[in-house]
């Protein structure tokens, strides 16, 4: 692997850590802060809320100023947010830490998705393979995070676990010092020019942007909600507190494995119909989660959700990047995640509030509704 690819792998691992860390530390953090599921939902939603303005801004900065500055700032702020969360003793401090975490993650994700085709496309014939292959490393970060946190919390402390994760999150910034970002592509910020044609106005008028954005609006809270509430849901179904984090890691493992399979087996040109099938399957699995009874059934459904969820985001991202020119990729990704952030903010709040009254299992009925919305958007893709 080249130095650039090593940097991208590190960034993707940190990106995966970002979506899994709150779910991994939720139980010990809630005990330390003395908060209920509604406030946990508030933390998850804050992560998505800050995503909206930050990733929009990062998209413009990425296209017009440069990718390296956004990338390195995101890595450094990610580390700072985990240190602040490690030190938090009050809910407000934890909320500020999660806000900073969401902002940092937004910066890394914006640049990371723009650079993904350059790092992983190689001689692959389609973008879907490249985005799935790159996101295997993202899934690996999400898979390893609950295991690492569970081990460190049990052997050391929550503070130690978060501090070590913070140290690792500085690796992408350190590696970025040795990468010449200007030489990566002819679609550099200097060549992107102004927002004239093709520009920001044409981006906003394109229905593909809005279809991708709406798909992410419905999909992103599914992934974050499973990451945040899996351990609690399994606990309600009789899975022990020690075993539940292992199934959360299993969720991310099947999530990662399905992306690896899709990278090499998904035929070019079949992205839309595959998205329809995966969306419908996600709706069916979430309905089954709401109605499941035994511990074994609940555990199997969590793993099945990972299989189905895995390729959805890479497919949406491949459709987006393949449709727009390189000079618009930063802003296109920014708008995509801004729309995703709206769903990420609102839907977990609703799940958390309902879970406080009826339990986490029934709270997933709201997630099932979002999966139904995703299925509808996927069907609209087939009409374009």
Image (cartoon, rainbow, N blue to C red):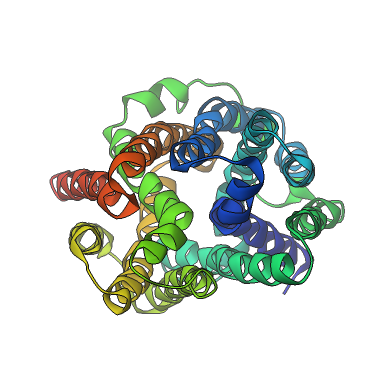
- Residue at horizontal 47%, vertical 75%? 250
Quarter of the view holding residue 5: bottom right
From the viewer's perspective, tell me whether residue 144 is left or right of residue 342: right
Q: How many numbered marks, from 0 up?
A: 0
From the viewer's perspective, tell me whether residue 296 is left or right of residue 332: left
Q: Is residue 142 above or below residue 19?
A: below
The reply to whether residue 249 is in sight is yes
The reply to whether residue 311 is in sight is no
Q: Is residue 306 above or below residue 361?
A: below
The percent coordinates of residue 39 (x first, y second) are 50, 36
- Residue at horizontal 35%, vertical 68%? 302
Q: Quadrant of the C terminus?
A: top left
- Residue at horizontal 15%, vertical 51%? 382
Closest to the observer, 197 or 43? 43
Closest to the observer, 297 or 179? 297
The percent coordinates of residue 191 (x first, y second) are 65, 34
Q: Quadrant of the N terminus?
A: bottom right
Quarter of the view holding residue 280: bottom left
The percent coordinates of residue 290 (x first, y second) are 22, 57
Closest to the observer, 119 or 373? 373
- Residue at horizontal 32%, vertical 75%? 295
The percent coordinates of residue 49 (x first, y second) are 50, 30
């Amino acid at each position: 692997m080249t130095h650039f690819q090593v940097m991208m792998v590190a960034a993707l691992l940190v990106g995966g850590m970002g979506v899994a860390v709150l779910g991994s530390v939720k139980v010990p953090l809630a005990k330390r802060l003395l908060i209920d599921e509604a406030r946990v939902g508030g933390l998850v939603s804050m992560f998505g809320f800050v995503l909206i303005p930050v990733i929009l801004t990062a998209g413009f900065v990425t296209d017009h100023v440069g990718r390296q500055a956004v990338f390195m700032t995101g890595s450094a702020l990610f580390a700072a947010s985990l240190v602040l969360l490690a030190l938090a003793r009050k809910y407000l401090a934890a909320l500020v830490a999660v806000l900073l975490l969401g902002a940092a993650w937004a910066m890394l994700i914006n640049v990371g998705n723009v650079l993904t085709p350059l790092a992983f496309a190689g001689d692959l014939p389609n973008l879907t393979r490249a985005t799935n292959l790159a996101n295997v490393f993202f899934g690996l970060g999400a898979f390893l995070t609950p295991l690492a946190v569970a081990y460190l919390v049990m052997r050391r402390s929550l503070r130690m676990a978060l501090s070590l994760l913070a140290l690792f999150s500085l690796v992408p910034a350190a590696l970025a010092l040795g990468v010449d970002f200007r030489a990566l592509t002819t679609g550099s910020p200097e060549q992107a020019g102004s927002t004239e044609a093709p520009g920001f106005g044409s981006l906003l008028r394109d229905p593909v942007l809005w279809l991708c954005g709406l798909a992410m609006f419905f999909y992103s809270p599914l992934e974050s909600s499973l990451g945040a509430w899996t351990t609690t849901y399994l606990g309600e179904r009789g899975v022990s507190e020690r075993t539940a984090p292992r199934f959360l890691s299993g969720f991310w493992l099947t999530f990662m494995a399905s992306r690896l399979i899709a990278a090499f087996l998904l035929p070019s040109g079949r992205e839309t119909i595959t998205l329809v099938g995966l969306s419908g399957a996600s709706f069916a699995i979430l309905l089954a989660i709401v109605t499941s009874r035994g511990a074994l059934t609940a555990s199997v459904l969590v793993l099945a959700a990972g299989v189905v969820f895995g390729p959805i985001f890479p497919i949406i991202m491949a459709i987006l990047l393949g449709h727009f020119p390189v000079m618009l990729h930063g802003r296109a990704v920014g708008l995509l995640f801004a729309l995703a952030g709206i769903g990420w903010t609102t839907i977990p709040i609703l799940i958390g509030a309902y879970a406080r009254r009826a339990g986490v299992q029934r709270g997933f009925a709201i997630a099932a509704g979002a999966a139904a919305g995703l299925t509808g958007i996927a069907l609209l893709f087939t009409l374009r």
